[in-house]
Image: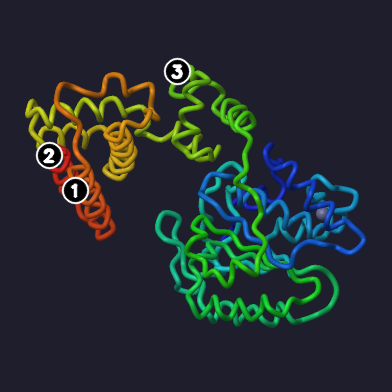
Amino acid sequence: MTLPTTTADAYFAPLLPWQTALWAQLTSRVLSSSNQLPHALLAAGMSGLGKRAFVWRLVAWLLCRQREQHVRGACGVCESCQWLKSGTHPNLAVLPHQLLPVEVAEDDTPLKSRDKKSKGNKANTEGAPPRIKVDDIRELQPFIYQGGQGLRICVLEHAETMTVAASNALLKTLEEPQAQVHFILISDHPAQILPTIKSRVQQLPLHRIETRLALDYVTNKLGSVVNHERVSQDEIAQLLTLAEGAPMAAIRLAQSPWYGKRALWLTTWQALREHRRSSTAASDYWQSQLDIDAFIQLSEVMLTEIQRMSLDLPPRQADISAQTLTDKPLPDMLAISDFADSLQRIKIARLQNVQDKFAYDALMQALSVL
Ligand SMILES: [Zn+2]
């Protein structure tokens, strides 16, 4: 299988604006007389911060033969950079095996699969990533202990998917640091990584993003226009708030099929709870508007908003909240939690391939009693 050309781009993409200080700090530590790069690093935090873009760029630079002359990023032409481009670098090991950095520079989403190396352990782009098993860590041992010249790097993607046995095997390895061997762990869910592992790795402060830089970046990337409509700074600020400050997540949000349908969701909800519309009619209508998974995402965001209003917290979606409510009182916490449960049940049913129509019907029914 020919790898997409974007594979190599992740190694050589421009540095994200909020990562320049960290980059300068790390690279100067490496270039100091005694390479003071920590033995094991963790790039953790929610999806959309640009963690992966940073990691793959750092990997390329660390391995680059000309890094002293190219402190802002790998040269792209030396033997090492060529190896990266062809996906065959002898000094780079990536777990899970079938994952390679693809399309991470623009988006901090999980990696895509590499069919060639998959061992019947199916990876797919939408579902859960494959778990890192103890055998995977054992297979790394010759690579780690081979000695010899040059830096070697192990990247563990989705580090939270390590089994307990795999974590323990890795822990042993981390406790016996080898010269010239560096580990970089990546995780969107660091809370699920064993604390013993976390205590052995140094976390990269990738989550500190200056608001101004994030605003500028998102404005620039959206080109000020989404769906032919101009996007104001207030709207971009709102996107960033909803994305918990993660710039790539804010961009994904703006481009999602449901973001522009939030007001419509409220209208449907009001019509349902005031019995002006039946849940079947609402279900039929929305089936023609959005696929059910998008509607579930939309409903989760709207539920959070309703919950905030019930708690008298300031709205996060100033653009739509004004028109939110009728005379009917806001749902209480019990109703909100019932609806959240229904959403969860429907999400699980979706994983078991329940039909769109059935899921939509159930969701509208739940919405009518929220
Ligand atoms: Zn190079």
The residue beneath circle 2 is 369
The image quadrant where one finds the C terminus is top left
Circle nearer the viewer, 2 or 3: 2
| Amino acid at the residue labelled 1 | Asp
Question: Which of the labelled discs sits on residue 229, or is there none?
Answer: 3
Tag 3 secondary structure = strand
Tag 1 secondary structure = helix
Point 30% across, 35% down: residue: 311
Point 59% across, 66% down: residue: 198
In the image, is the residue at mark 1 within 8 Å of ligand 1 by its beta carbon?
no
Q: Is residue 204 left or right of residue 160?
A: right
The image quadrant where one finds the N terminus is bottom right
Q: Say whether disc 1 or disc 3 marks the residue closer to the N-terminus.
A: 3
Is label 1 in contact with label 2 (beta carbons under 8 Å)?
A: yes
The residue beneath circle 1 is 338
Q: Say whether disc 2 or disc 3 marks the residue closer to the N-terminus.
A: 3
